Amino acid sequence: MHTSVHPNHNLGRCFDCAVNYNPIDLVCARNKAGFRSAVSWLQALEKLRRESDYGKFLSAMRRQSRVK
């Protein structure tokens, strides 16, 4: 999935399928998850971002993107 997110609008776009997403829809599509799972995933990422430095946050994002 080749995506881009506009930080001012908090919307993403998938360049493979030419679809625009909000953050929850993007996580649902990428992780093949339901709405509640996507919200939980985003909450966990936000918690990690707040509690750790940016390098750890990026590492977790990379690890999570490899897990299906």
Image: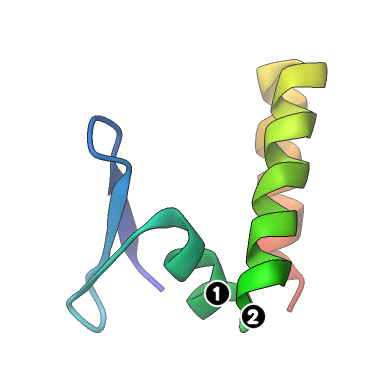
x 32%, y 42%: residue: 10
Amino acid type at image mark 2: Gly
Any part of residue 6 in sight: yes
Quarter of the rendering occupied by the N terminus:
bottom left
Query: Tag 2: Cα neighbours inside 10 Å, few (<14), some, or many (≥20)?
Result: few
Q: Which residue is at the front of the view, 3 or 22?
A: 22
Q: Position of residue 44 (x, y in %)?
A: 77, 44
Q: Which mark is residue 34?
A: 2
Asked if labels 2 and 1 touch by Cβ distance under 8 angstroms, the answer is yes
Q: Which mark is residue 28?
A: 1
Residue sitting at the far front: 36
CA distance separating discs 1 and 2:
6 Å
Q: Position of residue 65 (x, y in %)?
A: 65, 62
Left/right placement of residue 24 relative to residue 59 reads: left
Query: Tag 1: Cα neighbours inside 10 Å, few (<14), some, or many (≥20)?
Result: some
Secondary structure beneath label 2 = loop
Is 34 drawn above or below residue 2 in the view shown? below
